[in-house]
Image (spheres, rainbow, N blue to C red):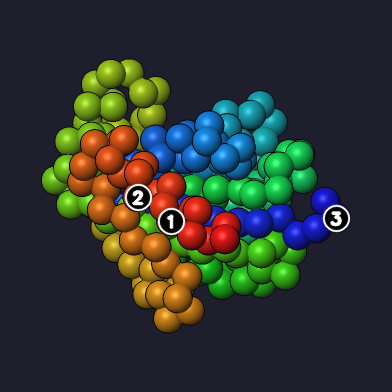
């Protein structure tokens, strides 16, 4: 990677539509979608991974995996990709994540903005339970894990505030259809690209 990779953090509660909107951004703009959760789930499933048991413990309990592991997985995924703009979905999720990112990755990347999907918890829970019932394959799409995930998600709001002070947050109301939400997302991306 010669030029610094560009980064868009994609944040919002479980079920706020982060993955759906990231897929649309990939299709429209060719960005590379890196879901912190997917990277962790993939690593958890790798035979012989030194981190798999630790990741499993945190995911089952709805707590946050140590930031050094997440940053390492994100950096590896960036190095493997030919893309120049990365959507980092579900990270940073708390102050420890943010501090780790600032220490490990901030100098290696260029943060464009934070895309924050704002959605009421009841809508998010319905979406996650529906996704789980449809066979998402996610062990955390159940009511017990979701309750824990929403408690953990509250920490993300401090990250939103941190970046708001730098005028880097674009808030999108995601309590609408995916297509309606994406119209606002496109406007946000186009305005930043100008």
13 sits to left or right of 55? left
Task: Give x and y (percent) for residue 37.
Answer: 48, 42
**138 displayed left or right of 77:** left
Name the residue tied to disc 2. Answer: 184
Q: Residue at x 28, y 18 (%)?
A: 134
Left or right placement of residue 175 versus residue 78 in this view? left
Q: Residues within 10 Å of mark 2 (few under 14, many from 20)?
A: some
- Identify the residue at image location x=36%, y=23%: 136
Q: Are marks 3 and 2 in contact (CB under 8 Å)?
A: no
Against 137, residue 76 (above or below) is below
Q: Is residue 132 left or right of residue 97?
A: left
Q: Residue furthest top?
A: 135
Say what secondary structure mark 1 lies in: helix
Asked if 141 appears above or below 155 in the picture, the reply is: above
**Residue 176 position in % (x across, y down):** 21, 42
**Dot label at residue 153:** none
Residue at image coords 43%, 56%: 188
Give the x, y percent position of residue 29: 57, 40
Q: Which residue is mark 3?
A: 2
Tell me which residue sits at (22%, 31%) in the image.
129
Please rate how many residues cluster around mark 1, counting C-alpha atoms within 10 Å: few if below 14, some from 14 to 19, many from 20.
some
Dots 1, 2 in contact, CB < 8 A: yes
Q: Which mark is residue 188?
A: 1
Which residue ends up furthest to the right in the rendered image? 2
Point out the frontmost of discs 3 and 1. Answer: 1
Please report whichever mark, 3 or 1, sits nearer to the chain's N-terminal start.
3
Q: Residues within 10 Å of mark 3 (few under 14, many from 20)?
A: few
Choose top left, top right, bottom left or bottom right for residue 67.
bottom right
Instruction: Say which label, 3 or 2, has the lower sequence index.
Output: 3
């Amino acid at each position: 990677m010669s030029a610094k990779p560009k980064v868009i953090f994609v944040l919002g509660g479980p079920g706020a539509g982060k993955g759906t909107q990231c897929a649309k951004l990939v299709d429209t703009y060719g960005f590379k979608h890196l879901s912190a959760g997917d990277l962790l789930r993939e690593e958890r499933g790798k035979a012989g991974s030194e981190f798999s048991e630790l990741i499993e413990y945190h995911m089952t309990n709805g707590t946050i995996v140590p930031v050094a592991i997440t940053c390492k997985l994100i950096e590896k995924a960036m190095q493997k990709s030919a893309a120049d703009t990365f959507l980092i979905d579900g990270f940073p999720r708390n102050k420890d994540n943010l501090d780790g990112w600032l220490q490990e990755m901030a100098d290696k990347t260029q943060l464009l903005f934070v895309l924050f999907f704002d959605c009421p918890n009841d809508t998010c829970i319905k979406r996650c339970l529906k996704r789980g019932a449809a066979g998402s394959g996610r062990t955390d799409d159940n009511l017990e894990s979701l309750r824990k995930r929403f408690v953990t998600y509250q920490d993300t709001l401090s990250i939103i505030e941190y970046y708001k002070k730098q005028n880097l947050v674009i808030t999108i109301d995601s309590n609408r259809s995916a297509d309606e939400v994406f119209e606002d997302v496109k406007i946000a991306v186009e305005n930043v690209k100008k």
